[in-house]
Image: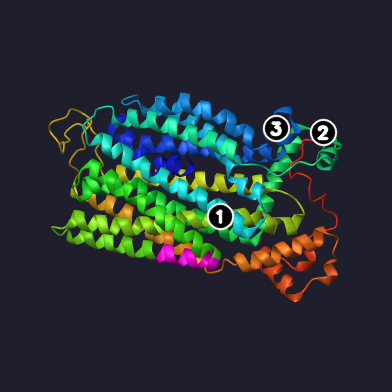
Amino acid sequence: MGGGWNTIISGLMLYFFTTYGDVSAVQAGTILFIARIVDAVVSLIIGPLTDNFYRTRLGKKFGRRHFFLLIGAPLLLVVFPLLWISQQGFWYYLIVYLAVEMIMAMILIPWETLPTEMTDNYKLRTKLSSTRMFLSATGTFLVFFIPAQIKGTNNPNAYLITGLIFSVLFAGAVITTYFTTWERKLTPEFLAELDAQPKVPVGKLITDNLKDFGSTFKNSSFRKHLAIYLFSFTGKDIFATALTFFVVYAVHGSESFGLTLQALSIIGLPTTVLAAFLMIRKGPRYLFAMSYSVIIACLLALGAIYLIQPSSTMVLLVIVGLAYQAGRSILEFTPWNVFPFIPDVDRIMTRQDRAGIYAAVMTFGRKSTGAVATLIVSWFLDLGGFLKPGSEGGVQLDASCLNSCPLVQSSGTQHVIALVVIVGPLVLIAIAFAISRFMYLDPQNHAVLRAEIDRLEAGGSKDDVTSEARVVVEKLTGHPYESAWPEDAISPTAPTVSTKG
C-alpha cells in the first residue's frame, strides 16, 4: 500500500485530475499541494501519538502502532474509491483527497516504525525492510499496470474500476500487516514507570512535541539521511508526475503506453532482491551511488531521445524506462532500509525511544516536498500553455471521443514538459548523490554503535569507551562522545513525548 499510494500521488493524480476531473493543471496541483501540507502537519501529531498510545486502554489491547492499522483498513474501503469518480471538479476532489491523505497518514506513520519495533539487529532489520520494499515494488508496478490494461479496453470507467481494485488490495495489505507483525514488549516494570508520571497540560505537550521535532536535526546521520531522501524522492516524484504528459504530448505516444512505461517498475522486484544483498554486504553509500548513476544516465538518454526523436523512439523509451526503473527501485529501497537504524543513533544521544518522532519528521518532509514538487509541475504546465480536455480551441489527439481525450499541445508546451521531466529530476538527484558520499551509517558502524549502546545499558562506564567506538559515535551523531548517553536524561525506556509529567 505504501509504495502503491505514493506512486499514485506522484504518477497518476495530476494526469487524472487534468484529463478526467474537469480541473486545470494549476487547480490540480493546488489540490495535491493543500492536501499534502495539511496531511504533513497531521503526520507530526500522529507520530508522537503512536509513541504514547500504549498508555490508553485501546493501545494496551491492540498495540500502540497496530491500533491505527486496524481502524485504517475499513476506512480505506469506504473512502478511497470516491477519489476516482470523474468530472467532479475542484472542491469535490480537494475534500475527498484530504480525507484519503488523513487515512493514509494514520496507517503509514505507525507502520514505518515496525522494523525498529521488531528487532534491533542490523541484518534482521534489513531483511524485514527488504521484504517490505519487495512487496512495495509490486504496488508500484500494479498502480500503472492495472489502469493501463483497463484503459486499453477503452472502458470509460477505467480509473473508477482501478480505484475499487486498489481499495481492496490496500485494505487487505494493511490487515495482513496487522496480523503478521509485532511491537516491542511492554514489561510490567516499563508500564509501572510510565504510569507513575503525572499528567501535563495539552499546551505543554504540543510545545514538547515541537521541541522534540526540532531536536531530531541535532542528529548528523538523520540530517544527511533526510536531505538525501527528500532531494532524491522529490526528483523521482517530478519524473513520475510528468512522464505520462511527456509520452502523450511530447513524443506523441498513447496514454496506455505512458502508463505501461511506468509499469516497467516490475523490474524493481528482482532489483530489490539484489539491493537487499548489497545493503548487507556493501552498505547504503554503495547503493546510493549505483542508483543515482543509473538514473542520471537515463535522464540524459531521455533528453537525447526527445531532441532527436528517431523512428525507434518507443523502443528506446522502453529500454531507457527499464534501466530507470531499476535505478529508481534501488533509490526507494535504500533510504527506508537506513531509517530503522537512525533511532539507534538518537538513542545514544538521548537515551530515549523516539522512532515515532523520526518517522513523523521524515513523513512531514516527504509530504511537504512532494506537495511542492507537484505544484511546481502544474505551474510549469500552465505557464507553458497546457490545454486541458474541453479547452476552447483545443484539437484532440483522438477525434473519436468527446471531452476526455488529450489535446494537441503547442511546441512550446512540449518543450516545457520535456524540461520538467528531464532537467528537474537531474538537478535534484545530483544533489542527493553528492550528500550521500558523506553518509556513514553502514553495517560495520552500526554494529559498533549497537555494541556501545548495549555496553552502556548494562551499566558500563563512558570512561571505558574504546577508541573505535568513540570515533564511530562522534561520526554518526556529529557531537563529541562526552555528550553521548547523558546522565541527566530520562530512563532509556521512557517515551519521548509524555502525556504525564
Queried whether the magenta region covers residue 291, the answer comes back as yes
Q: Residue at x 63, y 32 (%)?
A: 67
The amino acid on which the numbered mark 3 sits, given as a three-letter code, is: Gly
Q: Is the magenta stretch mostly helix, strand or loop?
A: helix
| Nearer the observer, 124 or 300 | 124
Q: Along the horizontal axis of the image, is 99 left or right of 339?
A: left
Determine whether the residue tagged by mark 2 lies in a helix, strand or loop: loop
**Residue found at the far front of this picture:** 180
Amino acid type, label 1: Lys
Up/down of 346 relative to 94, above or below: below
Q: State the image quarter where residue 316 is shown.
A: bottom left
State the extent of the magenta-drawn residues as a range: 281-293
Task: Using the rendered view, name the quadrant where residue 84 is placed.
Answer: top left
Kindly indicate whether the residue at mark 3 contacts the one at mark 2 (C-beta within 8 angstroms): no
Q: Name the residue under label 2.
A: 199
The type of residue carrying mark 2 is Lys
* Residue assigned mark 1: 127
Q: In this view, does 414 lie above or below 204?
A: below
Q: Report the residue marked by disc 3.
A: 59
Q: Is residue 253 magenta?
A: no
Mark 3 or 1: in front is: 1
> Left or right: where does residue 225 sit relative to residue 204?
left
